[in-house]
Image (spheres, rainbow, N blue to C red):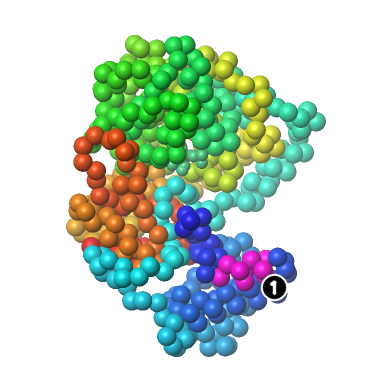
């Protein structure tokens, strides 16, 4: 899947994967240099990296790949000496004009409306939504927190843990969520899970078991199908709510039979980016109070709001009726598999004593990471970087594609580019020809959603590494009508 090799690090890996992987296996600086050099030479030779393409600086590429800067600089120098690259003061290191072997150049870019005559080359750039900028993971700070937490851990921390998670983490999360997201959080009601989907799995089972048993969970018209699948796997129906410019039509909940809960991305609807209107927020909580139902609030990217104060969590309105769900997947890294839920008391009692599958040591490290202030620092720094990228994206679109409307820009790690009806797939194909993997809005539409579907592109601008950002943006602009 393109999604798994989407940043520059993996972008090199996609084209140059084997050599670089083999070099890593060797482990030495010389092995890495050889692997990188061979991989880059092959990319230049086959035309995968077109003549004139500017390569990232040795410092940036080294940071993205997690290797020493000298290793990259040496590989570049060897390729300059061989004639595959050119290096000039002021214009950086580029693929040499005559580097491509005759007959191996990729097909020229296709216009957005022209269908691909043969399968497009496998994209090496990606704007798939769903991931933060992975090469910025704060390795040194995390290691420091991990070391400190490990040294301080009592011996019982190495045994089976409380299914809710370590008290150290639940305590700092309660403080953080109250301060940063307005969540009414008691550590006794916080449950740590291995990612949001793990939390949904528990909730789906708990909803069936609570009295009266839930038979259906209302969901948004647009969302991730595998999130809906968590409920369907537990035998629950997932009827969709309508969606307009004020967000999901929570007023429709009143007429829906058998619905015991509603799943909402209130602060930043995923994927359309609408912020749920205050009246719609109130309507959801009122409905839950009146009917004994629950609101499940997915606050997946609540920390990333750019132009105004973040919208506080819905959960603050009624902690007994709203389940708050947060994750480290956007703020830190999906690879941590760390999420948290703040539950009404009745659901805490439904937790199985054997469901303690989240690594205790990782939890202790995260607790230390948050308590030391490193988490806040990281989020603040990334917010600034993402905001800068978003501004660059919006400015470039205004200049080069003024007819394309951008929406959902106030928050999160992606925006939507609205497209004329019927053009979504042709733009995605055009992007493939530019070496760029993109997803359309239609992939997220609930199959039973009311009304007409919308054509649009999901632009996950946070995903590229710094070195891949400029070529990725350029490829996007060239793909648009
Ligand atoms: C809408 C939404 N909710 C939740 C999550 C978090 O999922 P997880 O914690 O399983 O990585 C994501 C991550 O991409 C998401 O897009």
Residue 228, picture quadrant: top left
Q: Which residue corresponds to the image point at 26% horizontal and 18% vertical from the top-left?
A: 255
Side of 391 relative to 405 (left or right): right
Given residues 145 and 468, the one toward you in this image is 468
Q: Which residue corresponds to the image point at 36% horizontal and 76% vertical from the top-left?
A: 107
Q: Where is residue 219 in the image (x, y as percent from the top left)?
A: 36, 30
Q: Position of residue 272 (x, y in %)?
A: 31, 42
**Residue hosting label 1:** 31
- The secondary element bearing badge 1 is classed as helix
Side of 95 relative to 401 (left or right): right
- Kindly tell me whether residue 142 is visible in this rendering: yes
* Quadrant in the picture for the C terminus: bottom left
Q: Where is residue 446 in the image (x, y as percent from the top left)?
A: 33, 38
- Kindly tell me whether residue 471 is visible in this rendering: no
Crowd band around label 1 with a 10 angstrom C-alpha radius: few (<14), some (14–19), many (20+)? some
Q: Which residue corresponds to the image point at 65% horizontal and 51% vertical from the top-left?
A: 140
Note whether 264 is above or below 403 in the view shown. Answer: above
Q: Is mark 1 within 8 Å of ligand 1?
A: no
Q: Give the range drawn in magenta.
A: 16-24
Side of 226 relative to 447 (left or right): right
Q: Give the main secondary structure of the magenta stretch.
A: helix
Given residues 94 and 440, the one toward you in this image is 440
Side of 301 relative to 457 (left or right): right
Note whether 39 is above or below 160 in the view shown. Answer: below
């Amino acid at each position: 899947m393109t999604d798994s090799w989407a940043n520059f690090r993996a972008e090199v890996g996609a084209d140059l994967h084997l050599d670089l992987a083999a070099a890593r296996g060797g482990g030495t600086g010389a092995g890495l240099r050889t692997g990188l050099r061979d991989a880059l030479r092959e990319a230049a030779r086959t035309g995968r990296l077109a003549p004139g393409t500017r390569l990232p600086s040795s410092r940036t590429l080294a940071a993205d790949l997690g290797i020493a800067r000298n290793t990259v600089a040496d590989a570049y120098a060897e390729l300059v000496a061989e004639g595959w690259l050119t290096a000039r003061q002021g214009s950086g290191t580029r693929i040499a004009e005559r580097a491509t072997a005759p007959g191996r150049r990729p097909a020229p870019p296709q216009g957005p409306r022209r269908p691909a005559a043969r399968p497009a080359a496998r994209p090496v750039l990606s704007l798939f939504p769903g991931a933060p900028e992975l090469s910025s993971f704060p390795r040194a700070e995390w290691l420091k927190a991990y070391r400190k937490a490990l040294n301080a851990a009592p011996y019982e921390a190495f045994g089976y843990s409380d299914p809710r998670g370590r008290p150290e983490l639940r305590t700092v999360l309660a403080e953080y969520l109250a301060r940063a997201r307005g969540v009414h959080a008691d550590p006794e009601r916080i449950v740590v899970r291995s990612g949001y989907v793990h939390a949904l799995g528990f909730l789906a089972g708990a909803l069936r078991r609570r009295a009266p048993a839930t038979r259906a969970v209302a969901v948004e018209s647009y969302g991730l199908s595998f999130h809906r699948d968590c409920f369907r796997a537990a035998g629950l129906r997932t009827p969709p709510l309508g969606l307009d410019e004020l967000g999901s039509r929570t007023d429709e909940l009143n007429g829906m039979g058998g619905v015991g809960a509603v799943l909402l991305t209130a602060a930043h609807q995923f994927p359309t980016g609408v912020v749920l209107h205050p009246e719609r927020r109130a309507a959801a909580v009122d409905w839950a109070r009146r009917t004994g139902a629950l609101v499940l609030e997915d606050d997946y990217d609540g920390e990333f709001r750019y132009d105004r104060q973040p919208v506080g969590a819905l959960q603050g309105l009624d902690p007994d009726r709203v389940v708050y769900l947060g994750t480290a997947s956007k703020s830190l890294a999906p690879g941590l598999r760390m999420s948290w839920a703040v539950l009404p008391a009745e659901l805490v009692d439904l937790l199985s004593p054997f469901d303690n599958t989240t690594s205790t040591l990782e939890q202790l490290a995260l607790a230390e990471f948050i308590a030391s202030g490193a988490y806040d620092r990281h989020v603040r720094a990334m917010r600034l970087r993402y905001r800068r990228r978003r501004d660059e994206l919006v400015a470039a679109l205004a200049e080069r594609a003024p007819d394309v409307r951008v929406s959902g820009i106030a928050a999160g790690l992606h925006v939507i580019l609205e497209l004329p009806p019927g053009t979504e797939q042709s733009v995605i194909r055009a992007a493939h020809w530019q070496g760029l993997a993109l997803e359309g809005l239609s992939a997220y539409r609930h199959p039973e959603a009311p009304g007409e579907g919308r054509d649009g592109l999901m632009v996950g601008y946070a995903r590229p590494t710094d070195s891949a950002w400029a070529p990725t943006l350029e490829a996007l602009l060239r793909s648009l009508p």
